[in-house]
Image: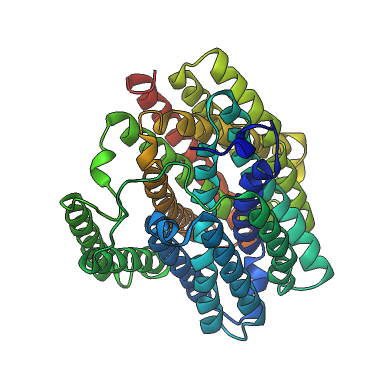
Amino acid sequence: MPSAALIAPRYSLHHVAIAVIVLLEYLQSVMVAFGSAAIRHGVQASPPQFSLAAACYAAVAVLMILSHRWWVQRLGYRTLLRLSLWVFGAGAVLCALAPNAGTFIAARMVQALGGAAFFTASRVQILHYQGPARLPALLFLPFGIMLGSGLAPILAGALLAAFDWHALFWAMLPLVWLVDGVVRHAVPEHEPVENERLDQAHPWGMLLLAGGVFLLQFVLERARFERWTSGPLLWGGGLLALALLVLHWRHEWQRSTPLVPYRHFTSERYLWGMAVYGFGYLVVSSCSYVLPLFLAQGLGLSLAQCGWLLGLTGLAAMPFAVLHLKLMLRWPHLRRFLLVGTVLLAAFAWLMARQQPATTGWPLWLAVFLLNGVFMPFLLGTAAASTFSQVEERVFSHAYQVKNAMREVANAVGLLLGTVLLQQRSALHAVRAPELASGQLMLLAGQDFFRGLLLVALMVGLLLQLQRRFV
């Protein structure tokens, strides 16, 4: 049962905890992505090595996410979060001190051991609130995400201008200390809804999961750079990874007390919701890679200009998250909100495909705002409101763990798609017009990417119009 201290005040330190826990993960992730060129130069990493660091982070994160409740049941929520924060902070220190690529990869894996707990823990804490008290608490999760994502490029640009890439990680330490203080005073040790039996991790199931996850992330990372030279080997590795994950799923399905009870998550509504989530994460991940390159190299914006553009449009999403929630409460037509999301994405892609270096102004700000400020609240917010509506609270944590594990894989796939499409289109334009400079090639390749995204948005919108799960 939730304690009275958690549900009595409308806003409390516990609400702040919900926001700042997830804020920390998004702040660090976006800062690392924004400052990737400086970090890569600082640790003397080649593009494949830096990409491997991201793949290893994601692989460790998936394992920790899927075992999240196992740790909670044995340590308690407050203890787990505080340990995760300390490990995350230690990983940040190791990243800042990393002298080479190998050390940096290991340091990012340490960060993943801690940071993987933040998103799921933040969402599960909302279950402490019942009835009308849950709605205000629910808004603190997207606020934390949007605040972290919006502040990250602005803060990263300022830190890189004033110091160097090390500051991107040193800046985490005072924030970790502050969040630890909030968690220590606000987060209860017990779960919101406890199971009668503890989750059980089976060695064979964990081995299959670890093998499948690490192999899949490795294949996705290598495919960005070796798809032509090692194509058959990568396809074979990818199929083997999927086979290992299917065997893990089957193994856990047959157990009475599995690590994750997958058999509870087979409803059409949940699966459709996961598909919408997956599409949203693919779009966000691929655009997070393409957009900074297109802005800086294609349109000629400075690092500071890119940071302010991406940051302010991300922060502008916060009032639209509130607007989206109010509209859904008044007109709970899920399919219409999803269609609005795809239309907004199509408008963003259309505007971006028309951008030229000499004409950057309000159309560029409007385009990026449509993606960061409106598309994500309307599409991902609608998915969040509907996917878990029929999931029992006693297995809600598991359902959210599966979603967040899928997010890590979708982010890797989105990064792969963005990389491959830019490389292919740049190479094609270089063959057609060898006299073009690298900036012009990036401009043309980026415009091709956004034209393709426009078609995808329209096709997904048509599919959502035809489906009957979200109505």
Which residue is at the front of the view, 222 or 132?
Answer: 132
The residue most toward the bottom is: 99
Residue at left 45%, top 21%?
A: 334
Q: Height in image: 373 above or below 411?
A: above
Residue at left 28%, top 65%?
A: 206
Q: Position of residue 324 (x, y in %)?
A: 60, 25
Q: Height in image: 337 above or below 275?
A: above
Q: Position of residue 118 (x, y in %)?
A: 54, 55
Q: Position of residue 331 (x, y in %)?
A: 53, 13
Residue 9 picture quarter: top right
The residue most toward the top is: 331
The residue most toward the right is: 162
Which residue is at the front of the view, 369 or 253?
Answer: 253
Q: Is residue 350 visible?
A: no
Residue at left 72%, top 71%?
A: 170
Q: Is residue 450 visible?
A: yes
Please give left or right for residue 342 compared with residue 7 in the image.
Answer: left
Please give left or right for residue 341 compared with residue 11 in the image.
Answer: left
Q: Height in image: 26 above or below 5?
A: below
Q: Quadrant of the C terminus?
A: top left
Residue 232 picture quarter: bottom left
Q: Height in image: 266 above or below 344?
A: below
Please give left or right for residue 125 compared with residue 282 in the image.
Answer: right
- Count numbered badges in the picture: 0
Q: How is the image coloured?
A: rainbow
Residue at left 25%, top 70%?
A: 233
Q: Position of residue 22 (x, y in %)?
A: 60, 50
